[in-house]
Amino acid sequence: MTENPDQNPPAYSPLVTTLAKVRTEVGRAVVGQDAAVTGLIIALLCRGHVLLEGVPGVAKTLLVRTLAASLALDTKRVQFTPDLMPGDITGSLVYDAQTSRFSFREGPVFTNLMLGDEINRTPPKTQSALLEAMEERQVTVDGEARRLPEPFLVIATQNPVEYEGTYPLPEAQLDRFLLKLQLPLPDRAVEAEVLRRHAAGFDPRDLGAAGVTAVASLEDLEAARSEVAKVEISPEVIAYIVDVCRATRAATATSLGVSPRGATALLATTRAWAWLSGRDFVTPDDVKALALPTLAHRIQLTAEAELEGVTADSVVESVLAAVPVPR
């Protein structure tokens, strides 16, 4: 996925321009992560969750906070640790001595954008507590289901360098992330701009002082989602998506290819990408643009392939090169 769809898309809907303002607003605080910003907007349009991967210090937390501020959404942050319990995320029943009753105290999952920092640093039992929330948009405590706010996104971060004391995410949980976005280290010019802003007094803890304001509303987001759902996708492009996903299952380097859930995710993200590009139809190029962030994290490699240095990204790239493109 490139940094933006089209720099100046021929917007067929005013809402495309409105959401483009969100990218600009986030840029007031976050420099050089345009591709990640676009990916998060796609996730909001598709009601999907995002896995952010990058070394510490590349503005993952700031990115989420700024995005929430530009859309007037609530956000909460959870630092995942080895001793974090499921109830610390979902909430729990608390005894009230005055009423002699148990009342439910909401956990941080009751928000719009939940940032889970270093999600792979907590045991599988706690990771699995998120599965119901991510899939059903609800949590069940003491047999009672409680709905989560709308919109609700889990934005989880992983450190790709340090693996000591971490727990790899199970395949079932990885498959529930719509996108996996990489936040690379900035190039020299971008890093210099970051330092210039800090030298001028920028405080990442005070977004208001940086001039970040809400430029789009929940109503705008809901209307945009309705328009994305109407983006046309031809039978030929649908067949192309299916062929790409099936080819990952047949690849010799994979022990687990992309599931049908992954295929539907690619359908959704390509529609959102086309809409952000100012079009009401999907092209094969849209599929190629979104294939890596949508599919690669769903692929499990064989032990032999890992030893040979094969990566999930290279599997997707080879599949895209091999599968015939519809004309």
Image (cartoon, rainbow, N blue to C red):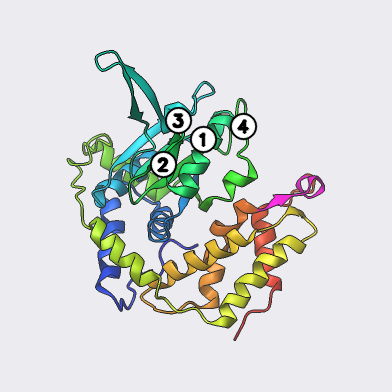
Q: Is residue 54 visible?
A: no
Q: Tags 2 and 4 in contact by the CB under 8 Å rule? A: no
Q: Which of pointers 2 and 3 indicates the residue nearer the eye?
A: 3
- Gap between marks 2 and 4, in whole Å? 20 Å
* Number of residues whose C-alpha sits closer than 10 Å to that of mark 1, classed few (under 14), some (14–19) or many (20 or more): some
Residue marked by disc 2: 60
Q: Residue 129 got which mark?
A: 1
300 within the magenta span: yes
Q: Which residues are magenta?
A: 299-306
In this rendering, would 233 be left or right of 249?
A: left
Vertical relation: 219 (above or below) 14 = above
Q: Is residue 14 visible?
A: yes
- Gap between marks 4 and 1, in whole Å? 15 Å
Label 2 vs 3, first from the N-terminus: 2
Q: Residue 142 got which mark?
A: 3
Label 2 vs 4, first from the N-terminus: 2
At x 56% / y 34%, what residue is drawn? 120
Label 1 vs 2, first from the N-terminus: 2
Badge 4 amino acid:
Tyr
303 within the magenta span: yes
* Number of residues whose C-alpha sits closer than 10 Å to that of mark 3, classed few (under 14), some (14–19) or many (20 or more): few
Which secondary structure lies at badge 2?
helix
Q: Which of pointers 4 and 1 indicates the residue nearer the eye?
A: 1
Residue marked by disc 4: 167
At x 57% / y 30%, what residue is drawn? 125
**Quarter of the image that includes the C terminus:** bottom right
Q: Which of pointers 3 and 1 indicates the residue nearer the eye?
A: 3
Dividing the picture into quadrants, the one containing residue 313 is bottom right
- Gap between marks 1 and 2, in whole Å? 23 Å
